[in-house]
Amino acid sequence: APDIDVAKVRAHLSQFQTIATNNGGNRRSTGQGYRDSVAYVKGKLQAAGYTVTEQPCTSGCSSGAGPNLIAEWPGGNASNVYMFGAHLDGVSAGPGINDNGSGSAALLETALTLAAQNPTMTNKVRFGWWTDEEQGLNGSDFYVRSLSSAQRSAIKAYYNFDMIASTNGGYFINHITSSAAAPMKEYWDSLNLQPEENREGAGRSDDYSFEQYSIPTSGYAMGASARKTSAQQAKWGGTANAAYDGCYHSSCDTTSNINATGLDRSVDGIAHTLWKVAVSGGAPTT
Ligand code: PHE
Ligand code: CA
Ligand code: ZN
Ligand code: ZN
Ligand code: ZN
């Protein structure tokens, strides 16, 4: 799999920051900051050759919420769909750069790298950027409910990325012992990161929408407002008894609130996983 350039991921984060600054300081689902975020991601994907769909959330979302954004890469077996998703909305309090510019930008750069490399696909890859997560996982719930049972059973795994660059973070994997998690864990194990189960995030992000329909799920996270333990500080560094992200849902969740090392390890593991599940020849470095 390719080594994703974290500088390019950070450049997308700078764009999200600018979008927030220009729209009252946030990217909440009902505001122009969200709609501008959708337009930014959509424009990059279309320029790279993706088929991109805006899906209006017509039930269960906040009134006036912007759409989900869905992008599929051509090729691969459409009976075996692997989905990678992140919420693109933020809270009203701040620009939402770790939560969840980080997951959104990492997926965008992974998608652009896939397009640039244009490898032979075995399975189908689909990306989702969700609306209105912060008000109750609403965009992803609407998406899964909008699928037919055949479309749902074609999704062999859904991988979620919510807060993957927390400044005092840890290395957390959703459903870490599951088959779906195996390629995600394999990559972080290769870096000797000693990942742990994402207990803090269980049921609290968009993977839960898929889990409710028995679709296998996994993903990476670096943590929110819970505090790092002494044992975690011993293996990962950082500050014990402090929040993984001290700017969670705050005005200080800016481009300064990014752990570039963690972001790089996350985005490279996303690429490792995508290549392993859906690209001919799998994960060896290209
Ligand atoms: N889903 C939460 C949010 O967007 C973030 C979160 C992730 C909280 C993981 C806890 C654990 O605010
Ligand atoms: Ca990298
Ligand atoms: Zn949040
Ligand atoms: Zn979040
Ligand atoms: Zn679960």
Image (spheres, grey):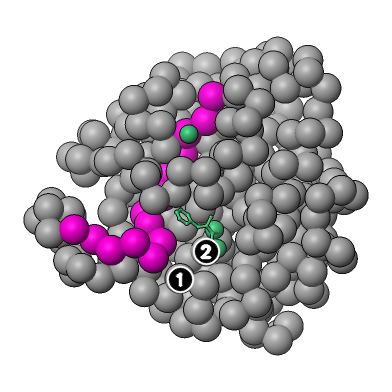
Tags 2 and 1 in contact by the CB under 8 Å rule?
yes
Q: Which mark is residue 248?
A: 1
Q: Amino acid at mark 2?
A: Asp
In this image, 160 relative to 53: left or right? left
Q: Regarding mark 1 in the picture, which secondary structure is present there? A: loop
Residue 218 sits inside the magenta stretch: yes
Label 2 beta carbon less than 8 Å to ligand 3: yes
Which quadrant of the structure image shows residue 169? bottom left
Residue 249 sits inside the magenta stretch: no
Q: Is residue 83 above or below residue 247?
A: above
The answer to whether any part of residue 153 appears in the image is yes
Q: Which mark is residue 99?
A: 2
Q: Residue at x 46, y 24 (%)?
A: 180
The answer to whether any part of residue 49 appears in the image is no
Q: Residues within 10 Å of mark 1 (few under 14, many from 20)?
A: many
Q: Which residues are magenta?
A: 216-229
In this image, 271 relative to 186: left or right? right
x and y, in percent, of residue 174 in the image: 42, 37
Q: Is residue 176 above or below residue 123?
A: below
Label 1 beta carbon less than 8 Å to ligand 3: yes
